[in-house]
Image (cartoon, rainbow, N blue to C red):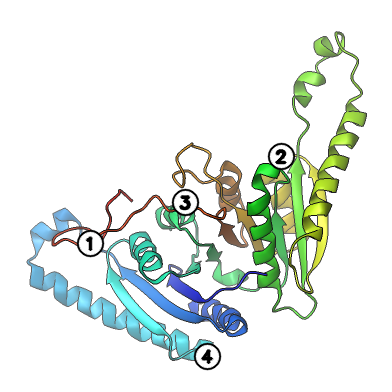
Amino acid sequence: MGTFRRILFTPLARGDNDRALAAVAALADRHRSTISVLASIDEPSRLQRLLHDASFFEEVQYAQSQAMLDEIRHWCQRAGCPDVDVEIEIGSAALAVLRRVHVEAHDLVVITSDSIASDHATVRRLLRKSPCPVWVIRPARVATARILVAIDPNPAEEALNRRILELAATMAAGSEHPRVHVVHAWELYGEATLRNPDFQGKSIIDLEELSRRQEDVVRAAIDDLLENVDAGATRWILHVEKGEPVAVLTQLIDDENVDLLVIGTVARSGVSGLVMGNTAERVLDAVSCGVLAVKPPGFTSPIQFGRRTPGSDGWMSTPL
């Protein structure tokens, strides 16, 4: 199974961060991991800078930083991890996290978010560009007792599927009887055309038999994959469902009261890391549970960091 050594926790949610931090601390305890907390404060806009001098912003930012630091230390106390390293940065939360992952080689980023809509830009940037897995926690759904994994048995995605399954088993390992639901949603290629009366008049095709054959092939591929994954004591519960992927996933999340969805993010634009997989992006908007987004092995973030220069926005040598 997967192992986390260095975990970076970034709170974007307005409440219940202590509960989320407690869940992260429990995960860190099982893996003997270190936790760092990184929070950020917005920079003033160019227009705002015209209204006040630099000392005004320094005073405001210092007061904000102290208030935030006190609040985070209070969360840490209540979460049972009072000694974690806490830092506050000024500027883009996404940039601060990506830079920290780059410099300190974190292997899991945890974000809390009340609403993906309100934190849209930050969450999307991290899911697209973080080289390590990103766990988005909705504070109301902190638990990881009920986990759903979405996989694609395409041979080209085998390495990603293995990583997804291993990390799902890792997250489930804290349960007394770890179980993970595994789902693949499939559609019959060209079914709408094949069912068109005009087309059926020109070809003899047994659509039901074709569907059964495709489902059998999919099940066999997934069974073979599950047999060769290091899952510890985790028991897999397989769902092979015909239908549009987002609809199948959201329905299963509701039916099984899922706490955490584990899903791969794969660039489809031809430029690695710039575009998250279409299904993953749409699912993120549609579900209310937590999401653990996993990159393929060997993924390299398109964000590169060099030496910091005075007056620059950070350490980036490529755009965020």
Q: Residue at x 82, y 53 (%)?
A: 224
Camera-near label (2 vs 3) is 3
> Helix, strand, or loop for circle 2?
loop
Q: Please report whichever mark, 4 or 2, sits nearer to the chain's N-terminal start.
A: 4
Q: Which residue is mark 4?
A: 80
With respect to residue 216, does 209 lie above or below?
A: above
> Helix, strand, or loop for circle 3?
helix
How far is the residue under mark 3 from the one under mark 4? 32 Å
Asked whether, in this view, residue 242 is left or right of residue 173, the answer is right
Camera-near label (1 vs 3) is 1
Q: Residues within 10 Å of mark 1 (few under 14, many from 20)?
A: few
Q: Please report whichever mark, 1 or 3, sits nearer to the chain's N-terminal start.
A: 3
Q: Which residue is mark 2?
A: 244
Camera-near label (1 vs 2) is 1
How far is the residue under mark 1 from the one under mark 2? 46 Å
Task: Find out whether the residues at labels 4 and 2 contact each other: C-beta distance under 8 Å.
Answer: no
How far across and down, in percent of the image, does residue 146 sit? 73, 68
Q: Residue at x 68, y 50 (%)?
A: 158
How far is the residue under mark 4 from the one under mark 2? 43 Å
The amino acid type of the residue labelled 4 equals Gly
Q: Which residue is mark 3?
A: 128
How far across and down, in percent of the image, does residue 315 sit? 26, 60
Task: Find out whether the residues at labels 1 and 3 contact each other: C-beta distance under 8 Å.
Answer: no
How far is the residue under mark 1 from the one under mark 4? 37 Å
> Helix, strand, or loop for circle 1?
loop
